[in-house]
């Protein structure tokens, strides 16, 4: 089982994650990605899905047209773990391929 990050470790990780922030009232991190259109948003989600499935670590997300809202937390650890930080980094890298920073 993944180990929950301390508050200090989570804060340090967030400083290195462009666009991500803490979720109020919950030990989780979140980001909203905005793409050019639905096709790009769906393409982003498809690419992230492959990474998430390979890592067996899946996001909570919601898509409306060109926007993808993501929340990451490791349910087994009841909070943010290194798995979430690594998936957030991967999402940022994939988003950058679509010109989203």
Image: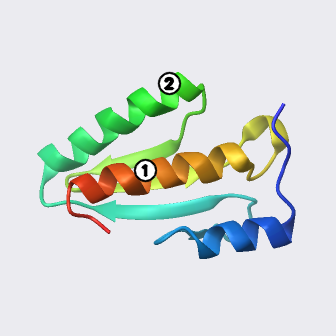
Image quadrant where one finds the N terminus = top right
Percent across and percent down for residue 32 are 40, 63
Disc 2 marks which residue? 53
Q: Which quadrant holds residue 14? A: bottom right
Disc 1/disc 2 C-alpha distance (Å): 13 Å
The numbered mark, 1 or 2, whose residue comes first in the sequence reads: 2
Is 30 above or below relative to 2? below
Q: Secondary structure at mark 1?
A: helix
Residue at 34% from the left image edge and 61% from the top image edge: 33
Image quadrant where one finds the C terminus = bottom left
Is 63 above or below relative to 56? below
**Disc 1 residue crowd, few under 14, some 14–19, many 20+, Cα 10 Å:** many
The way the protein has been coloured in the rendering is: rainbow
Percent across and percent down for residue 3 are 86, 44
Disc 1 marks which residue? 91
Residue at 68% from the left image edge and 58% from the top image edge: 28
Q: Is residue 67 visible?
A: no
Residue 3, labelled with which disc?
A: none
Residue at 20% from the left image edge and 55% from the top image edge: 98
Percent across and percent down for residue 34 are 27, 63
Residue at 80% from the left image edge and 35% from the top image edge: 76
Percent across and percent down for residue 55 are 57, 28
Taking depth in this image into account, of 38 and 18 the one nearest to the observer is 18
Q: Which quadrant holds residue 16? A: bottom right
């Amino acid at each position: 089982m993944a180990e929950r990050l301390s508050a200090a470790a989570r804060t340090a990780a967030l400083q290195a994650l462009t666009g991500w922030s803490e979720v109020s009232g919950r030990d989780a991190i979140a980001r909203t990605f905005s793409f050019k259109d639905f096709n790009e948003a769906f393409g982003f989600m498809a690419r992230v899905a492959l990474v998430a499935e390979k890592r067996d670590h899946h996001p909570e997300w919601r898509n409306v047209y060109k926007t993808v809202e993501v929340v990451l937390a490791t349910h087994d650890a009841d909070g943010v773990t290194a798995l979430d930080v690594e998936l957030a980094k991967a999402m940022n890298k994939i988003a950058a391929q679509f010109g989203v920073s």
